[in-house]
Every structure is written in structure tokens, then in C-alpha cells.
Amino acid sequence: MEVAFEPARAFVGEDVTLRVRITNDKRTPLPIVRLLVRFPFSLLPEAAPNPTALRGHRRRLSIAGRSEVELRLPVVVTTRGEYWLEGVDVVVSDPFDLAPIKLEAETDRPLLVMPEPRVGIPLHIARRLPFGSPAPSVRLFEDREHFAGVRDYEPGDPMHHVHWRLSAHTGKLQTKRYEPTRSAEVLFALDIANGEPFWHAVDPDTAEESIGWASYLARQAIHAGWRTGLVANTHLRRGRGPLRVRASDSAGNEAVLFAALARMPNQPTSDLGPVLREVGRRLVRRTTVIVVSPRPGAALSHEMEVLRRRGCDVIHLSPLEAFREAAS
């Protein structure tokens, strides 16, 4: 028996199907096959008559000899998270149902439901971002005030960038390198709390809104070609440090980042300020830091100012402020 979600990763609101394939390898038919698929809470088949009942799908089948039956059950996904089936029970019996045999199966992979990227970000806020909405192309300009070293000359390099003294010394043309005015690297700092201290500011609904914002903006940044990372004041596993996805432009970075956004709890485990302080020590100049925080407290505001003094471009976004502006 094979049980699998198709696709295994989806965004909230997308179509997902649970595929169940039962194979009879023997010549003898199976006249009675009773199937029960037990779904986890918040994940139900579309045909479920009563969502508050057994959260399961029941089906009675008959399978001929040396054949198979495949069921495809559409599933409703309304909440982000990682979902494992609670179980798949199959009862095979004789024509008189006198000697039933119970079998169990499990899925090899869970269903990963990623947060719906929120498109309701006000345009005046989106315009503050370097990758914007719609995302503009990212152009990097060299800052002549910040010398970064030399490299071998390449055809097309401006002649005024040639390091003539070093070229004469090495006998080979060398080109000066300068730091870009903007690094094509962005770090999203996601505040799951609704203020400071975090244990007095737990608000799951606001946290979900912040996660949705970060999801949308991270997708914009990745598709615009930015190396994108993520930190948050929560963790994926108990006893581990704060959640962190290192900035990368690799092909699999988007999947890794969205998997973290899908799995993260909406309960904070610390204030974001200390998390940003630790991560900020390793950031290079010109890194764009986007802090998604409903109500940044004094500690977080201080760390944001420290990063600005170190040469980072720090942008604060608050879903709550956007709501107030929309209401007014």
C-alpha cells in the first residue's frame, strides 16, 4: 500500500491530494476491503460530511486478483504547518466477513503547508523596499570610498580602475575592486512577539500576520535575485537556539526558507533584540535588514540603530501600523 500527499509542499489555499494505492499481488480477489484514513486536526478531506466527527475518510472496496485500486482524496489546507496522517487502517476480509485482517500503513513524508504570502501590504510600504512590489531589478554600484582589493584585469574593465603601480610590480594588469553601495543580501528579522517583554506579548493572530508578511517579502526578494536569510525569536525544536536560515542564492534556498516559515511556532521564546544583536555581529556592511515587528520595544529599537551605525540598511515594517493606516 502506498500513501502520499501530492504535492508534498503547498501554500495555504492551494489544491492538495492524498493518494492511496492498494495493490493485490495475489490471484485471489479481495471481496471486502475497508479503508480508514485518519487525518490530523486542521486537515480534512473536502468530502468530509462532518468536520467535528472522526476527522477520517472511510471507504469500502473490492479488489480483483493481481490488480490495484487508487483513491485520490482532495484535501483542504487552511493553516500553515507540518501535517502527518494519524494513520491509515486497512481491514481485509473474506466474503462472509468472518476473519478480518487489519493492516496499517504510514506516509513516508508529511504535508508541508507554507504560509500564504500576504499580498495586502500597502503600496507605500512596498515602495520603501529595495526589491519592491513589483520588484525592480537590483543594480549594484561601486563605492569609490571603500576599497575592497584587486583582481586580475578582465576585458571590459574601465581603464581608470586599473591599479597601475601594482600592475607594473606584478607584470600583469590588476583591477581595483570596491565595495558595492548596496549588498544584494537581505536578512528578514521576524518578531513573533507583540512587544516587550515577549512573555507578556503573546498574540498568535498578530504573529501569523507577521509571518505572512515575511513570506511575501522573502519571495519577492528571492525572485529578484537577492541572497535571502531569516531569523526569528522562536525555535523549531525545543532546546535549540533561535530559528535561523542563512542567506543564500542557491536554488534550494527558497524551499528551505519557506519550510522554516511553515514549521515555526507562533509562540515567541525570547525577545528579538538579543537575537538580532548576535546575528548582527556577522553581517557585512550594506546588508539590508528588514525587521518585521508589530511593536518594537526599546531593546529591539536599540539593536536596529546599532546595525545602522555599522553600515546596514535597516527597514522596520509593522503589520499593526498598516492596519491602523488602512482603518483611518
Image (cartoon, rainbow, N blue to C red):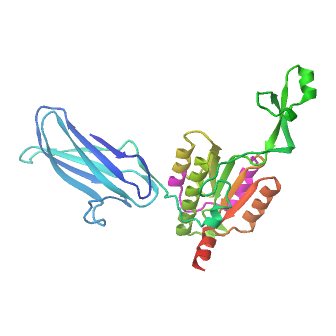
Residue 135 magenta-drawn? no
Q: Position of residue 313 (x, y in %)?
A: 75, 55
The foreground one among 294 and 228 is 228
Outermost residue on the bottom side: it is: 328
Outermost residue on the top side: it is: 171
Residue shown at 91% from the left, 28% from the top: 164
Does residue 35 lie above or below 123 as drawn?
above
Position of 235 compared to 312: left or right? left
Position of 161 compared to 321: left or right? right
Residue bounds of the magenta highlight: 260-283
Residue 261 magenta-drawn? yes
Does residue 198 lie above or below 97 as drawn?
below
Quarter holding residue 31: top left
Residue shown at 41% from the left, 47% from the top: 110
> Is residue 212 at all visible to an observer of this figure?
yes
Quarter holding residue 63: top left
